[in-house]
Image (cartoon, grey):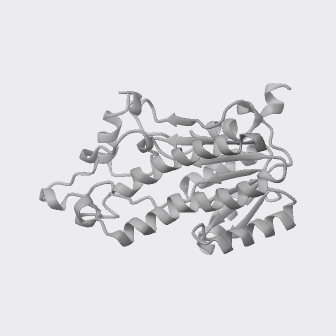
Amino acid sequence: MSYLKKSRLDKKVAIITGGAGLLGMQHAFALLECGARVIIADINSEVIEKAQNKLTKKYSEMIGSFVMDVTDVASIKKTKDEICKKYGSIDILINNAAIDPKVDNAHQIKESSRFENFSINQWNFELNVGLMGAFLCSQVFGGYMANNGGGVILNIASDLSVIAPDQRLYRKKDLSEEMQPVKPVTYSVIKAGLVGLTRYLAAYWADKKIRVNALSPGGVYNNQPDDFVSRLSDLIPMNRMAEVDEYRGAVQFLCSDLSSYMTGQNILIDGGRSII
């Protein structure tokens, strides 16, 4: 089979959780470009509508959407049944839904983000969405694929699945040490957990023709404050953050037959940050 044919996803049906988010939209564009029918699933109907309007400008016949709560197995099963009824199959799952605490001028997370003060309620909330959500979606959608000829699961992790957050990136002037914001513990735990889930499922479902990999992006530029961008860029050998569309090629590779002999891997694309 030629390289171009291996990259095609014609007649494949993909669901992307958190599909209306910044990277979720990019994952959708990536798969649409390869011919897949793409379902974006998110918990917020208004956000879904805005995302779908952007996607349908070019791909009106190939995009669908469902309101779905990744922490609610009944919601996931209902979505699975409706997708199968409407589109006939599910071939690709991208576990992208997550809570990403922003530490910038618009989203101040101060003493409550620090490990000593981090609440069990917040721990449970973030793990439920980012890790249990991927577990439940893999169980429901992956279980369907296991009984219907196989498929692909792609878990969206982070470079912080293999390195610790450098908390110096988030420091604010004129704040005492105990008030300094930090990237919370949940983010690292969730992303590392997704890599563990990836390896487990890759081995568990290998005989069912399901390939499971993780993609670990580095920081994506999204109009963050200049001082943060400068600090982070200084830690990256390529000396810049990623552009929002720079992960499309990796998604296409990992979800198509271009990666037909790859499973259980965590692919880091971070401008080299994790190598030094």
Q: Can residue 57 be seen in this view?
A: no
Residue 24 in view (yes/no): yes
Task: Tell me what residue is drawn at x 74 percent, y 59 percent.
Answer: 56
Q: Foreground residue, 19 or 188?
A: 188
Position of residue 169 relative to residue 49, above or below, is above
- Which of these two is toward me, 47 or 122? 122
x then y, percent, for residue 261: 71, 30
Task: Please report the residue visible at 61 percent of the width from the left and 38 percent of the height from the top.
Answer: 264
Q: Quadrant of residue 247?
A: top right
Q: Position of residue 149 (x, y in %)?
A: 84, 47
- Decide: is 61 above or below 30: below
* Position above or below: 8 against 62: above
Q: In screen coordinates, is 159 left or right of 136?
A: left
**Numbered circles on residues, count:** 0
**Quadrant into which the N terminus falls:** top right
Image: 37 above or below 237? below
Would you say 179 lies left or right of 220 here? left
User: In the image, residue 155 lies at what x, y percent?
Assistant: 59, 48
